[in-house]
Image (cartoon, helix red, strand yellow):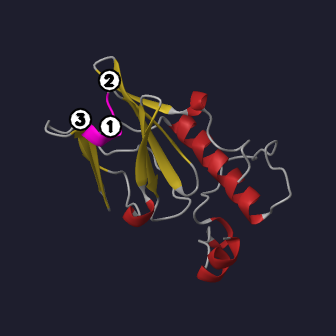
């Protein structure tokens, strides 16, 4: 994937509750990333993060979960993980349906406004073009009219086959 098409920190979506930022999130063709600032001094060994096919729960061990929500869509649990780096809990959820545009990271946490959702869909479509056509630069490309769905456009996004994955290693 071209780094130019990956979401930047400025392009992250913010979920706030009562005026306070709870987490930020972004997405690529294959994953949804959630970023949570943790209190100073919190180490990874006192955190828990349970990633299920359609549910996410995390917090500090021995306390009620900080968040306990259903994900917007199904995730591949075996390919999803979390890390703690520089005071930020980063949860990477691998989409079960590659190229599906998520309009929120977690259910009940609002939805992207239509303009922002279209912007995400455009970036995902360009990311798909980039993956399917290595060597071409689609970063300056634009769409006339509505942006096609990156998951279904022209036969749909395809997941890597076992054969392709084997020889990428």
Q: Residues within 10 Å of mark 3 (few under 14, many from 20)?
A: few
User: Disc 3 marks which residue?
Assistant: 66
Q: Which mark is residue 39?
A: 2
What's the residue at 32%, 37% (across, down)?
109
Q: Is residue 79 above or below residue 122?
A: below
Q: Residues within 10 Å of mark 2 (few under 14, many from 20)?
A: few
Q: Position of residue 124 (x, y in %)?
A: 63, 51
The residues bearing labels 3 and 2 have C-alpha atoms spaced at a distance of: 12 Å
Whether pointer 2 and pointer 1 mark residues with C-beta atoms closer than 8 Å, the reply is: no
The residues bearing labels 2 and 1 have C-alpha atoms spaced at a distance of: 22 Å
What's the residue at 40%, 60% (across, down)?
75
What's the residue at 33%, 34% (across, down)?
43
Instruction: Give the residues in magenta.
Output: 42-46
User: Disc 1 marks which residue?
Assistant: 109
In this rendering, which labeled residue sits more in front, label 3 or label 1?
A: 3
Q: Position of residue 48 (x, y in %)?
A: 26, 45
């Amino acid at each position: 994937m071209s780094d130019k098409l990956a979401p930047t920190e400025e392009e992250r979506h913010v979920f706030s509750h009562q005026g306070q930022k709870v987490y930020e999130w972004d997405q690529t063709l294959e994953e949804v990333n959630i970023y949570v600032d943790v209190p100073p001094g919190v180490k990874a060994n006192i955190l828990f993060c349970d990633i299920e096919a359609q549910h996410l729960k995390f917090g500090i061990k021995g306390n009620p979960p900080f968040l306990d929500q259903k994900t917007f869509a199904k995730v591949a649990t075996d390919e999803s993980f979390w890390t703690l780096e520089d005071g930020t809990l980063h949860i990477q959820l691998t989409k079960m349906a590659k190229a599906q545009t998520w309009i929120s990271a977690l259910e009940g946490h609002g939805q992207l406004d239509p303009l922002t959702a279209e912007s995400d869909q455009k970036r995902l479509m360009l990311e798909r073009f980039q993956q399917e056509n290595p060597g071409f630069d689609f970063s300056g490309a634009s769409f006339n009219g509505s942006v096609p769905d990156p998951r279904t456009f022209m036969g749909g996004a395809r997941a890597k086959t076992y054969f392709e994955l084997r020889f990428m290693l």
